[in-house]
């Protein structure tokens, strides 16, 4: 398999896995959950230093904000902004990011052969820098090849 096909298949497989993982958390809506930080109930004993992450599920085409579609997903200390970090990486956002990466992958499907849209360099190899950048987050995953590193 040429290096372009191998790196594309590797990135696509990892994106597919991440997409499945992001959707696992949802309770059955048509879209993955969206997470937000919510204030704890003021009379709760730990409200001064705890924050809660509220999950919104869109079930049966109802609004994200339907009361039965919201529930506490996590309770965390808010001293180091863990609550903001968790909410920022909610499943809905992760799925949107994965779709964007898939579009980039698709545009570069044939760049090694000069048939696709390619904005990256292909210095001494059969794939462009953009493909190496897409593979970089998965360097610790089985199947990653050292020659895919883009340390330049």
Image: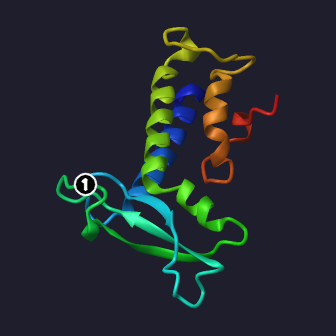
Instruction: Reply above or below: 90 against 82.
Output: above
Instruction: Reply above or below: 23 against 44.
Output: above
Q: Position of residue 95 (x, y in %)?
A: 43, 46
Instruction: Reply above or below: 36 against 100.
Output: below
Q: Position of residue 22 (x, y in %)?
A: 43, 57
> Residue at horizontal 30%, vertical 59%?
65
Is residue 53 found left or right of 126 in the rendered image? left
- Picture quadrant of residue 146: top right
> Residue at horizontal 30%, vertical 56%?
64
Q: Position of residue 120 (x, y in %)?
A: 66, 18
> Residue at horizontal 66%, vertical 72%?
78
**If the image is split into quadrants, where does the C terminus sit?**
top right
> Which of 101 and 135 lies nearest the eye of the viewer?
101
Q: Residue furthest front?
A: 43
Q: Position of residue 1 (x, y in %)?
A: 53, 30
> Which of 117 and 83 lies nearest the eye of the viewer?
83
Instruction: Reply above or below: 15 against 28.
Output: above
Q: Identify the residue under disc 1.
A: 63
């Amino acid at each position: 398999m040429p290096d372009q096909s191998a790196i594309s298949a590797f990135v696509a497989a990892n994106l597919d896995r991440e997409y499945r993982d992001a959707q696992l958390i949802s309770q059955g809506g048509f879209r993955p959950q969206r997470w937000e930080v919510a204030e704890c109930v003021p009379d709760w004993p730990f409200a001064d230093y705890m924050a809660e992450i509220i999950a919104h599920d869109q079930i049966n085409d109802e609004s994200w904000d339907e009361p039965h579609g919201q529930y506490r997903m996590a309770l965390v200390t808010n001293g180091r902004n863990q609550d903001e970090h968790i909410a920022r990486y909610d499943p809905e956002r992760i799925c949107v990011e994965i779709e964007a990466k898939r579009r980039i992958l698709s545009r570069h499907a044939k760049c090694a052969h000069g048939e696709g849209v390619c904005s990256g360099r292909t210095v001494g190899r059969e794939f462009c820098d953009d493909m190496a950048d897409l593979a970089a987050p998965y360097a610790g995953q089985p199947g990653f090849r050292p020659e895919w590193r883009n340390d330049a």
